[in-house]
Image (spheres, rainbow, N blue to C red):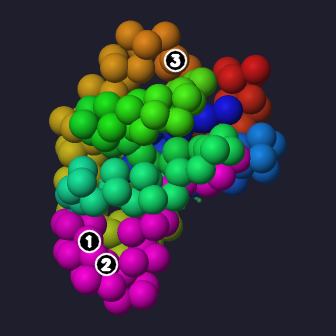
Amino acid sequence: MNLILLGAPGSGKGTQAEMLIAAHNLQHLSTGDMLRAEIANGTTLGLQAKQIMDAGELVSDDIVIGMIANRLNDSGALFDGFPRTIAQAEALDKLLADNHQNIAHVVYLNVDNDEIVARMLARGREDDNEETIRNRLSVFEAQTKPLIDFYQQQGKLRHVDGKGSVEEISARIAAAIA
Ligand code: B4P
């Protein structure tokens, strides 16, 4: 089974991913984690990505699609923070189709902006300052929200209320994909 976790920055995708990969024995593919690993290793890609991430912008489609293509294998995967643009979603559909696979469910974690800002300020990662958070939210509105319609039209979108305790949200996701 292949699943996508879709949601605004700080909506809890990484947090819920841990539960889902354990419950369904999935490969965890987080483009945010991959990019942070590139930065930690001081690679050329990491140096380029850091500037973009610190500004709250999206890293180029070619780079993140390439990272996913390199890691995809035949077991089921949980895509966490990918795709974030229509071009990424179309590339993912093609990559999976080439492997005779598809996406089973797209879980959209719905959390209001006030809660998101509070969570990210509490987390305090380098890209979690107020100005960057505001930009990340507007980038989400403009570039990632169109994916809601894209997956709705494919009949794969599962809306989940992302406010509440981590356990409550895990239970809602489990019910949505059962
Ligand atoms: P990501 O790493 O994907 O990060 P995120 O969207 O900020 O976080 P996430 O939703 O996973 O939230 P989390 O569980 O941590 O992206 C970072 C950057 O990388 C992007 O801005 C972009 O520049 C780049 N990038 C990544 N993928 C890309 C792509 N495909 N294309 C282009 N660029 C890409 O939760 C947030 C906080 O809330 C945590 O502190 C957590 O403990 C807390 N929390 C979680 N659940 C909670 C709950 N129920 N109640 C209270 N707090 C909760």
Spatial CA span between label 3 and label 1: 31 Å
Marks 1,2: beta carbons within 8 A: yes
In the image, residue 60 lies at what x, y percent?
21, 56
Range of the magenta residues? 26-55
In the image, residue 122 lies at what x, y percent?
49, 65
Residue 4 appears left or right of 139: right
Residue 165 visible in this rendered orientation of the protein: no
Reply above or below: 109 against 157.
below
Query: What amino acid is labelled 3 in the image?
Result: Lys
CB at mark 2 closer than 8 A to ligand 1?
Answer: no
Q: Quadrant of residue 171?
A: top right
Marks 2,3: beta carbons within 8 A: no
Reply above or below: 90 against 30.
above
**Which residue position holds label 3?**
156
Query: What amino acid is labelled 2 in the image?
Result: Gly
Q: Earlier in the sequence, mark 3 or mark 1?
A: 1
Q: Quadrant of residue 41?
A: bottom left
Residue 150 on the magenta segment: no
In the image, residue 161 lies at what x, y percent?
57, 28
